[in-house]
Amino acid sequence: EDQVTQSPEALRLQEGESSSLNCSYTVSGLRGLFWYRQDPGKGPEFLFTLYSAGEEKEKERLKATLTKKESFLHITAPKPEDSATYLCAVQARNQFYFGTGTSLTVIP
Amino acid sequence: GAGVSQSPRYKVAKRGQDVALRCDPISGHVSLFWYQQALGQGPEFLTYFQNEAQLDKSGLPSDRFFAERPEGSVSTLKIQRTQQEDSAVYLCASTLEGLGPYEQYFGPGTRLTVT
């Protein structure tokens, strides 16, 4: 069964305290893995697409990496404005599967 | 340019009522997706259009759910005889090309509450 699991469910960090979010997946025919940020009351906002194992992408304080079974979203020296829910999604064949997200809170 | 817009933003329906949710994708985007997001969960795929053709509707939870995109731009998700379990945020997303992998641009969602 195709499945996407994110951990931890919630994460509280002090401002400047780096950490990583995990997304593990079991799908056949992976076409791409996506990271989104979702703020309360808003739709998901696209961050990254990763296509193949070993790929890495960076944007400001965020860096996404991909292996054959999981992806990590590394947050370096986070700021309070990075507080949000981070969603991972995979595209397998013609469908998209989302994880339940990691709720990140960055405390000043 | 304008992003994906959805209307209404909030809808309260009494159980048994029919509702229609509208999505205006980014102009020129070929593909359009509908998702259902329950509180504290990730979005769940409902259906997918490429232009006016509905290519996948396998995620629609029952035959009370119906989606259309007659002219290949605006889409409407209709729910007949709403039930309490239909309460959720309904998200629409569009992509420039066909079935990717391309990043999806999401609208703000319609929060449906069935009482």
Image: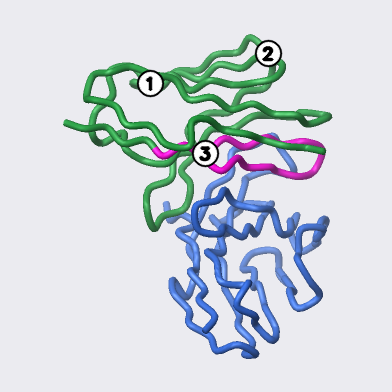
Chain colours: A green, B blue
Counting residues from the N terminus, which is met first, the one under dot 3 or under dot 1? Answer: 1
Amino acid carrying label 3: it is Leu
Q: Residue at x 75, y 74 (%)?
A: B66
Residue picked out by circle 2: A53
Q: Quadrant of residue A91?
A: top right
Q: Position of residue A78 (x, y in %)?
A: 28, 24
Q: Residue at x 54, y 24 (%)?
A: A22
Query: Is residue B64 magenta-colored?
Result: no
Residue picked out by circle 3: A87
Counting residues from the N terminus, which is met first, the one under dot 2 or under dot 1? Answer: 2
Q: Quadrant of residue A59?
A: top left
Local packing at callout 3 (Cα closer than 10 Å; few below 14, some 14-19, many 20+) is: many
Amino acid carrying label 1: it is Ile
* Disc 1 element: strand
Question: Is A78 left, or right, of B15 in this rendering?
Answer: left
Amino acid carrying label 2: it is Ala
Q: Are marks 3 and 2 on the same chain?
A: yes
Distance Cα–Cα, label 3 vs label 1: 14 Å
Q: Position of residue B14 (x, y in %)?
A: 55, 89
Question: Is A68 left, or right, of B57 in this rendering?
Answer: left
